């Protein structure tokens, strides 16, 4: 398309906004394809890698600028920073992550220019996924928000998740968008491109009906408690007794359940301060009623020097899990001492936690081992896969109260659904203010509590055994395979270019 640079920049910004609308709570999944097609066409029309990178950056500003507005809410309303400081930090947050679409554009176009620009649309999906892997797994402990596949949990592409996981499924969505862009721009091989897209969609739809895991026992009756304690009131000492009594009452009303789960840090007090006079008596009552409790609270090491974000099982067995994948700038400060100095300067004070480590024993409740994740950990497939195949179900405890009534709780719930689909396990997810829910092994929400209401929901879930293909492989194998294919594609392109030159 023969459009001016300004028009292309506007198109890419709007395309970034559209991609946000493909995710929860909007859930217009088809907009992801439209957004990507527009972006890829803008890169193809670029006259240089730098121009493409600028368009990628503008696209990222649209995506993250709208998609992570909840960062401002967290910093301003709950972090104690001024309006200007909160807005500045939210903008810098979005501006930083927007660098990754820019980097994807630069590398894709640069490689295409070195070989043959006509191959750009075939190169881009590989580069995108490899860059996303760096963003989602390595940098700053990972920020895997807005992976393309998360927007497709209710489409045919969801069928590929148990085989290829989030990254592999994202690649297929990206390849679909590339094929559409290829047809629109090149107007060549229309039959081949259309047939390939159709094959992807038909295969994905058929795979959605495959059951990769199987029930290994009788249903477990689980109750999830949502206390709806406002974040600005949660840690006030005068509210501790009220909070404990509220969760205690919800628990007493459901002693007929096999398992009762409280959300992240439902107990706003350190373990050593509350164990003797509250938790041990509660555990004794749980045993009398043949119920297991899963509760969450902060704890300290024996010497008091280290703090942990902890999940504790009470009842039949007492077990403990410390959060392993910590949230940067929320639970620990990277780039010290600079980051600490900057946050102190603007008046934001954050906690400092220690990771629990990779080799923690699985917790057990309801007669079965389960995979535990605390809040942000459910954004990382590796945390769930570590529990396979021994875990019969997944438990996530979360506190999204930091973000108020924004897009974040819905986006986070969408990400959690991916973990159930990848592992073929039921997920029981207890949150402080929402969204508390049960998710089936196919990624569908079975039952969900409303946002910002004190409530409990109960459901019978099946303990599951077996392994999906993806659970056996993991992201490492998928990424290495894509990298190998990409290398093969580059060799083929260079060989074909050299052959044409010598011809």
Image (spheres, grey):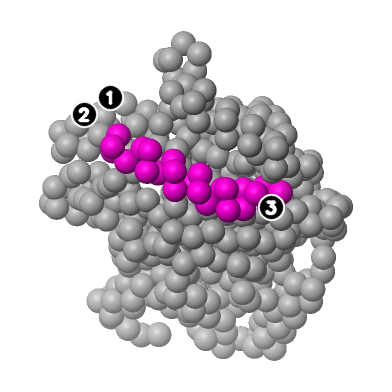
Identified at 71% across, 31% down, the residue is 317
Q: Is residue 159 left or right of residue 79?
A: right
* Disc ID at residue 256: 3
Pointer 1 residue: 337
Question: Magenta stretch: dominant SS?
Answer: helix
Q: Is residue 125 left or right of residue 76?
A: right
Which of pointers 3 and 1 lies earlier in the amino acid sequence? 3
Identified at 34% across, 63% down, the residue is 405
Q: Which residues are magenta?
A: 236-260
Pointer 2 residue: 341
Q: Nearer the viewer, residue 316 or 387?
A: 316
* Disc ID at residue 46: none
- What x and y, as percent, mark residue 199? 74, 79
* Disc 3 to disc 1, C-alpha distance: 51 Å
Q: Is residue 74 one of those drawn in magenta?
A: no
Quadrant (top left, top right, bottom left, bottom right) of the N terminus: bottom left
Q: Is residue 35 left or right of residue 218?
A: left
Quadrant (top left, top right, bottom left, bottom right) of the C terminus: bottom right
Identified at 55% across, 39% down, the residue is 295
Residue 135 visible, this orientation: no
Which of pointers 3 and 2 lies earlier in the amino acid sequence? 3
Check whether the beta carbons of the residues at disc 1 and disc 2 lie within 8 A of each other.
yes
Disc 1 packing (10 Å; few <14; some 14–19; many ≥20):
few
Residue 383 vs 206, above or below: the answer is above
Q: Residue furthest top?
A: 303
């Amino acid at each position: 398309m023969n459009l001016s640079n300004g028009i292309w920049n506007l198109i890419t910004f709007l395309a970034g906004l559209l991609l946000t609308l493909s995710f929860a709570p909007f859930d217009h999944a088809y907009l992801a394809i439209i957004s990507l097609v527009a972006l890829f066409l803008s890169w193809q029309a670029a006259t240089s890698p730098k121009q493409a990178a600028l368009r990628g950056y503008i696209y990222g500003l649209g995506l993250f600028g709208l998609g992570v507005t909840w960062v401002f809410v967290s910093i301003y309303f709950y972090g104690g920073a001024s309006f200007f400081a909160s807005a500045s930090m939210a903008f810098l947050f979005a501006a930083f992550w927007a660098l990754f679409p820019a980097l994807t554009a630069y590398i894709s176009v640069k490689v295409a220019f070195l070989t043959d620009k006509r191959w750009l649309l075939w190169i881009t999906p590989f580069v995108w996924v490899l860059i996303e892997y760096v963003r989602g797994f390595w940098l700053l402990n990972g920020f895997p928000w807005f992976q393309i596949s998360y927007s497709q949990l209710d489409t045919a592409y969801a069928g590929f998740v148990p085989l290829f996981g989030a990254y592999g499924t994202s690649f297929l969505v990206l390849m679909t968008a590339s094929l559409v862009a290829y047809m629109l721009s090149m107007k060549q091989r229309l039959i081949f491109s259309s047939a390939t897209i159709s094959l992807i969609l038909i295969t994905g739809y058929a795979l959605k009906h495959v059951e990769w895991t199987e029930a290994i026992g009788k249903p477990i009756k689980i109750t999830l408690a949502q206390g709806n304690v406002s974040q600005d009131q949660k840690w006030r000492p005068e509210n501790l007794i009220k909070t404990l009594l509220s969760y205690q009452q919800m628990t007493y009303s459901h002693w007929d359940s096999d398992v009762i789960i409280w959300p992240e840090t439902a107990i706003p007090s350190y373990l050593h301060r509350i164990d003797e006079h509250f938790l041990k008596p509660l555990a004794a009552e749980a045993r009398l009623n043949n119920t297991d409790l899963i509760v969450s609270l902060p704890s300290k090491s024996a010497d008091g020097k280290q703090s942990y974000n902890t999940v504790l099982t009470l009842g039949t067995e007492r077990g403990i899990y410390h959060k392993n994948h910590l949230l940067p700038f929320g639970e620990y400060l990277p780039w010290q001492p600079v980051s600490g100095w900057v946050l102190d300067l603007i008046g934001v004070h954050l906690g400092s936690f220690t990771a629990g480590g990779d080799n923690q024993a699985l917790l057990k409740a309801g007669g079965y081992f389960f995979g535990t994740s605390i809040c942000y950990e459910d954004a990382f497939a590796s945390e769930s896969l570590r529990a396979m195949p021994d875990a019969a179900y997944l438990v996530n405890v979360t506190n999204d109260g930091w973000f108020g009534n924004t897009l974040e709780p819905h986006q986070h719930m969408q990400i959690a659904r991916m973990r159930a689909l990848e592992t073929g396990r039921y997920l029981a997810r207890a949150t402080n203010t929402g969204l508390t829910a049960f998710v089936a092994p196919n990624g569908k929400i079975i039952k969900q509590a409303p946002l910002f209401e004190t409530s409990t929901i109960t459901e019978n879930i099946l303990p599951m055994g077996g392994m999906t293909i993806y659970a056996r492989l993991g992201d490492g194998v998928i990424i290495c395979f894509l990298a190998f294919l990409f290398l093969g594609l580059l060799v083929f392109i260079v060989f074909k270019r050299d052959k044409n030159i010598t011809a």
